[in-house]
Amino acid sequence: PEPALEAGAPAGAKAAPAGRVQPQLRNERSDRERLEYDVVIVGGGPAGLSAAIKLKQICKQKGRDLSVCVLDKGAQIGSHILSGNVLETRALDELLPEWKSMDGVPIKVPVASDKFRLLTRSSSVWLPPVKSNKGNYVVSLSEVCRWLGAHAEGLGVDVLPGFGASEVLYDWDGRVRGVATRDAGLSSTGARKDSYAPGVELLAPVTLLAEGCRGSLSESVMRRFQLRSECEPQTYGLGLKEVWEVPADRHTPGAVLHTLGFPLGSSTYGGGFVYHMDAGRVALGLVVGLDYKNPYLDMHMEFQRWKCHPAVRQHIEGGTCVGYGARALNEGGWQAVPKLHFPGGALIGCSAGFLNVPKIKGTHTAMKSGILAAEAAFRCLTGVSPYTIVEEDPLNPGGVSAMTMATGMPGLGDSTVLPASPSWDKETYTPGDMSAYESAFKWSWAADELRASRNVRPGFRAGLLPGVANAALESVVGLLGKTWGKTPWTLSLGKPDHESLDLARHAKPIEYPKPDGVISFDLPKSLYLSGTNHDHDQPCHLRLRDAGLPERVNEPHFAGPESRYCPAGVYEYAKDEASGRTKLVIHAQNCLHCKTCDIKDPRQNIEWVVPEGGGGPNYTAM
């Protein structure tokens, strides 16, 4: 008889067959339910959902059946997704060639105009766009992910929102075996409440981490397996975004504007965007490089000040702000891409960091990485090539040509990129080997893009004008060579972002104008529009490695920067009535899951971990 699953298990989960050798885990707990899949994907963003969809497509084509699960910590798919977003559909065209005719597709507004301006304090100067947006679409990425999630479910993927994966499971050989979700129903002191329920262990031979920028499990895996040992430190930006509903005379569907300059100083990297969506909506935001130096810089107030510039204000005047949010993004590009696979799984999407900085786009490269990871996972689990042989490679008779594989590797066949491997050993539960994914990605068009644009972001380390000049040089050399990235050098990203802050005594305090309540808003108003919420009575997910360090170092030497770099008012310095000393207070219930504190704290004292599933922001149109 077939082994039985416990009541309430998802449809695609498998109970362990009788006689199978169960993996012995270093960190297993007898009180946790155990579910088994062939592939577990952590993160319901564009990379994770693309991987899930591609796996099910290949299964259908090849007559195989692999169980696939997608976990997401948001209350619903898309509720934690925030991006600009002007979507380049290259990867979507590969994944779903018929997407334009599919039901409910939220990709409807082609780019109609594309402008780039350098802002001074009260005026602006036209600049030529660095990259063309012709053929791209203005979208809400949270809406796109909800649509992809529904399509994945229709293919048989178990899509499980509200499940925050908080722990990587390892066997006694140190290989990844899956993940576990966080225990629910713990009080702020860690005591079990009446609602207590232990987490669930989800085991699979292949675990794909698609958590997005600075994912907590991805970071732990990178440290454990030293995946960043041969690349430069990642550099980040923080994107703050609002969505407005504007009058018809202010709305031009498909209009795109990017800005440099004001309000950021010449030594601070960043820029703004204004995108006219459908249904009278305008998305606008400011991205600030987290390698900024002045500890007095306030992220939320910089964003509010930027909106008041005449070149920006004209797009939203007379409208109503209906949404606010923030999210960190990877900006390091090619130099900061880590090793992509580890024993039992791989990093995909922004967990690895595939943003193309001059394009200001990473969705298409994230989706491509998910597609390639799915192909490699299918091969390592079944021993069957996911490709169709239509053209013989002269260097590999009987193999699959590079054109067929669509990896961009000239003259090399299937056995080079995806080496022959036996199917996964279902009796001994051997973790899958995802090394083929690494090879496939490095020969893909996504990697070509990152290599070609590698020098743009580090060029701004020297300041705004040198950065613009360097980008212009890259563009000119690219035109002469018919492609970007032809300069014979590679610029360094420099030191990690948390080391860039100046001491407060060497920095100039910044005075910000009071929000007018019409175009610019105070933080409580903005935070309300994010819909963020957490159960107050749960263990704090923002952990201090040294509880006394903020009072000893951050406040006296850096003027308490966490109270300004956090875009949600999570961190506040207040006087303790009992001792009379200044103390850091953490309002974890305000957290937008942007991860800035985990990145920017000058002593790396703050660790962001996953809270109870379903908490956090509730984005609907971000």
Image (spheres, rainbow, N blue to C red):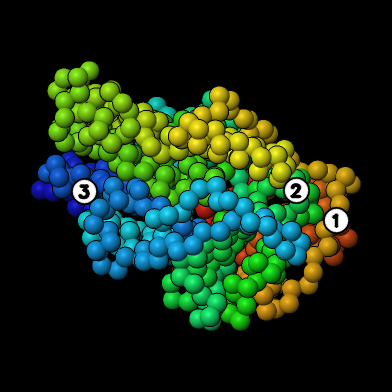
Task: Give percent across and percent down for residue 112.
Answer: 45, 64
User: Which residue does the image show at 60% across and 74% down from the upper left?
Assistant: 316
Question: Callout 1 environment at 10 Å: few (<14), some (14 to 19), or many (20+)?
Answer: few
For this rendering, which residue is in front, 333 or 374? 333
Say if mark 2 contacts mark 1, CB within 8 Å. no
Q: Earlier in the sequence, mark 3 or mark 1?
A: 3
Left/right placement of residue 622 relative to residue 571 reads: left
Label 1 sits on residue: 509
The disc, 2 or 3, on the residue closer to the chain's N-terminal end is 3
Marks 2/3: CA–CA distance: 49 Å
Q: Is residue 482 left or right of residue 116?
A: left
Residue 11 at x, y percent in the picture: 23, 57
- Mark sitting earlier along the chain (2/1): 2
User: Can the viewer see residue 197 in this picture?
Assistant: no
Q: Tell me the residue that label 3 is attached to.
A: 57
Secondary structure beneath dot 2 equals loop
Mark identifier at residue 550: none
Q: Is residue 436 above or below residue 372?
A: above
| Residue at the disc numbered 2 | 266
* Callout 3–callout 1 Cβ contact below 8 Å: no
Up the image or down, 110 lies above or below 371; here it is below
Q: Nearer the viewer, mark 2 or mark 3?
A: 2
Q: Tag 2: residue type?
A: Ser
Q: Nearer the viewer, mark 2 or mark 1?
A: 2
Quadrant in which residue 473 is drawn: top right
- Secondary structure type for disc 3: helix
Say which of 204 and 440 sits in front. 440
Residue 161 picture location, percent across and down = 39, 60
Q: Is residue 116 visible?
A: yes
How many numbered badges does the structure rendering display? 3
Q: Amino acid at mark 3?
A: Gln
